[in-house]
Image: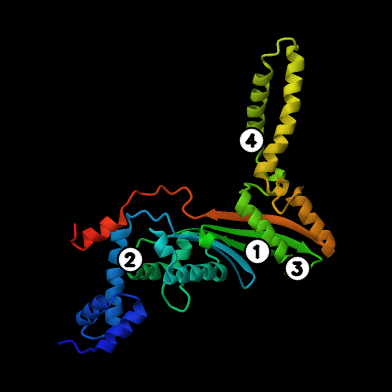
Amino acid sequence: MASFTAQDVKRLREMTNVGMMDCKKALTEADGDFDMAIEWLREKGKAASVKKAGKVAAEGVSYAAVINGVGVVIEVNSQTDFVAKNEIFQGFVRDLAAVVAEQNPADVEALKAATYPGTDRTVADVTSDRVLAIGENLQIRRFVRYAEGVSVPYVHQNGKVGVLVNLAVEGIDPAAVVELGKDVAMQICSMSPTYVSSDDVPAEAVEAEKAVQLAKALEEGASNTKIPAEKAKMIAENKVKGRMNNFFAEVCLLNQAFVKENKVTVGEHIKSVAKSLGGTITVTAFTRFVTGEGIEKAEENYADEVASLAGLK
């Protein structure tokens, strides 16, 4: 008969975050040996991960932070919003951000192969454990890391949106630009720009937009047959210039009206702050993650699923 006590079961549960009955079974299978019991649970955890791999993970959190001067924004997905609020899950996400900051993995696969903080195990192994403990499929989706300059994070609605803005600062104490960085990050969250400035918009995208706006302008003037075709085209091209300014004001961060003072652009506001601080501030990059964006969500009834598993349906 296996030699272990109720306290041993409690201790194993605290170590693994696994249910009491599973811990008791693990200790029974391992004849009371803790290391073997943990390995047994890990193996069962990996099996559980496989079973849950088909479940769509479209909830979760987008988390942004600066860790030892390195900016990180990461999205980790779960199946339900309920689990996304779980402290175990949130701690797991914070640990992953620390791995990105400290170990600089090249991509998600490299992150999975990296060493998990405080252990000699891989992130992939610990992810399997978390799946076992939490009971849902978990997926590390994407991350971005900024090692240079001044990074400022912003997390909206408990992780529905995560933003990280990176600034190059000269002649100014980096601590003095954090408030500006937060304002810019909130702008990015709210207005969803695609590019930093108009210089960053690919030429083909600019030409495509010009073609669309020219066709619209020509169509609008087509009903006025008194204007010669050559002059009508000139009028249409002038309209396009104004409309392209509107296009850049929509998709480019520095061209957008600043949300806190819409009489100036974001670019103008940044220059004003930099001047008041006696130096220069340049937005070099930004990343905006919307949790679950682009993931097709499955229509599932979790109440029915639980009832089915419990044999109630």
Query: Please, what secondary structure does the residue beneath circle 2 have?
Result: loop
Query: Please, what secondary structure does the residue beneath circle 1 have?
Result: strand
Q: Look at mark 2 in the image and give the residue it sits on.
A: 135
Q: Farthest residue in the top direction? A: 226
Q: Look at mark 3 in the image and give the residue it sits on.
A: 176
Q: Which-is-in-front pick, marks 4 and 2?
A: 2
Q: Earlier in the sequence, mark 4 or mark 2?
A: 2
Q: Earlier in the sequence, mark 3 or mark 2?
A: 2
The answer to whether residue 106 is seen in the rendering is no
80 shown above or below 220: below
Amino acid type of the residue tagged 2 in the rendering: Gly
Q: Earlier in the sequence, mark 3 or mark 4?
A: 3
Query: How far apart in space, not on screen, are marks 3 and 4 (Cα)?
Result: 38 Å
Amino acid type of the residue tagged 1 in the rendering: Val
Pointers 3 and 4 in contact (C-beta within 8 Å): no
Place residue 203 in its image quadrant: top right
